[in-house]
Amino acid sequence: MAGKGTPALKKRGAAIQRKTREVDITGKFIVDGAGTTDIKTPFPFLDHMLDLLAFHGFFDLSLRVSSDLSHHGIEDIGIAVGDAVARSIDGGKGIRRYGTAFAPMDKTLARVVVDISGRPSLFIAESLTPAAHSSISPLTGKEEFSFEDMHHFLEGLCLHAKITMHIDYRYDGDTHHLCEAIFKALGMALDSATTRDSRRKDVASTKGIIDL
């Protein structure tokens, strides 16, 4: 079985580019990477989450974002990254398609299940109390980040990568821990789903096509 980083195979990747009246996003996404990042957005906590996603998924991700908006800018980053993911995998040819991963963070446990299906949708088990939905402190700067902000990013990612994603979790009351566990598990699940399988010569669908 061939892995993502098989030397004989060309590395898969795509440029990231999205410009609207609200945001200007540029960068690059490499599927067959080493987990290296060069990320600078107006949202320091999201930068940290993307570092985790790329590191645990062995993706290379560079990203530059200019935006004065909060959740709209975060959603646009998800859209831009999701679009690059979809363009990186050659219509889904030869990939495993499915990925499942668990990641603990102290007393929090997150599970992420992805299907590169061509049918975009996002499902998150909503068990947070209203208090837990409050903003959390970022790692640097004055920007705040909430569970809803994470939802906006993931929704944009799913819609434009055209993947089905299910997330559920056991929650210890620390939203920071929850976000970290989810992004780590997402990296590992996407790693599995995008890995080439030498046994799969076409797409992993009995239809013979995945609408990416």
Image (cartoon, rainbow, N blue to C red):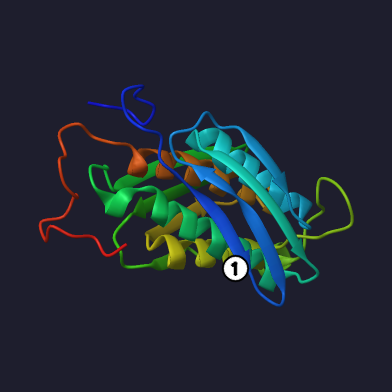
Is residue 81 at all visible to an observer of this figure?
Answer: yes
Residue 160 vertical position relative to residue 204 in the rendered view, above or below: below
| Rendering quarter of residue 52 | top right
Q: Residue at x 88, y 51 (%)?
A: 141
Q: How many marks?
A: 1
Q: Residue at x 19, y 31 (%)?
A: 198
Q: Residue furthest left?
A: 206
**Tag 1's secondary structure?**
helix
Out of 96 and 172, give the one closest to the viewer: 96
Please state, as top left, top right, bottom left or bottom right, where the C terminus lies in the image: bottom left
Give the left or right position of residue 25, taking residue 210 as reference.
right
**Residue 143 x, y percent position in the rendering:** 83, 59
Q: Is the residue marked by circle 1 packed among few (<14), some (14-19), or many (20+) residues within 10 Å?
A: many
**Residue 128 x, y percent position in the rendering:** 61, 63
Q: Residue at x 23, y 42 (%)?
A: 94
Q: Residue furthest right?
A: 142
Q: Residue at x 79, y 58 (%)?
A: 42
Q: Residue furthest bottom?
A: 21
Give the left or right position of residue 117, taking residue 75 as reference.
left
Out of 173 and 67, give the one closest to the viewer: 67
| Rendering quarter of residue 23 | bottom right
Out of 83 and 112, give the one closest to the viewer: 83
Which residue is denoted by mark 1 in the rendering?
152
| Rendering quarter of residue 144 | bottom right
Please state, as top left, top right, bottom left or bottom right, where the N terminus lies in the image: top left
What amino acid does circle 1 point to? His
**Residue 50 x, y percent position in the rendering:** 62, 46
